[in-house]
Amino acid sequence: MNKILIKFNNFFSNFEALGSLFLRLGVGIAFIIYGIGKFPLPPEGLTEYFGLPPFLASLVAISEVATGIVLIISHFIKNPIGHTLTRIAGLNIVILMICIFAVAHRDWFITKQLFTSIQIFLLIGGFYFLFKGNKS
């Protein structure tokens, strides 16, 4: 039984980097899609529903698209710049998601709705890339 477990673990350790890449692609693509969904600028939903100024609403949309792109591209930059860009993207995700929870989902704090939404997983992904960077 022990030999089977060792073989199983050795087999999947060859794919360890793929887990991080899949998470990066998922979070990055989600941010690109959410950001593009706010175009044309300024996003009417953010300005009318949440009362954000047009400049800030536009900054949110551009920031979401840029963060998703940077998160994906930085995976392929195998030096300290890629590592730093990944962490900056992670930090931006954390900031955006905390602001989203504070403005749009205040009533979700420690509820079933919070833990069954994509937003909590995007926040967790942001923390993951903020802490991990590009380290393998």
Image (cartoon, rainbow, N blue to C red):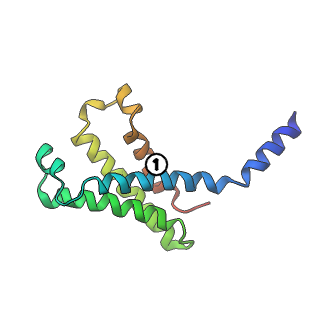
- The front one of 37 and 80 is 37
Count the marks: how many? 1
Residue 45 position within the rendered picture, expressed as x and y whole percent measured from the top left: 17, 47
Residue 54 falls left or right of residue 21:
left
The residue that disc 1 covers is: 125
Residue 20 position within the rendered picture, expressed as x and y whole percent measured from the top left: 57, 54
Residue visible at 25% across and 54% down?
38
Residue visible at 24% across and 41% down?
102
Quadrant where the N terminus is found in the figure: top right
Residue 57 quadrant: bottom left
Quadrant where the C terminus is found in the figure: bottom right
Q: Residues within 10 Å of mark 1 (few under 14, many from 20)?
A: many
Residue 127 position within the rendered picture, expressed as x and y whole percent measured from the top left: 44, 50
- The front one of 46 and 91 is 46
- The front one of 40 and 64 is 40
Residue visible at 40% across and 45% down?
123
Residue 122 falls left or right of residue 36:
right
- The front one of 57 and 103 is 57
Q: Secondary structure at mark 1?
A: helix
Decide: is 89 above or below 102. Answer: below
Decide: is 110 above or below 16. Answer: above
Name the residue at the top extreme.
112
Decide: is 33 above or below 72. Answer: above
Residue 134 position within the rendered picture, expressed as x and y whole percent measured from the top left: 54, 63
The amino acid sitting under disc 1 is Gly
Residue visible at 21% across and 42% down?
103
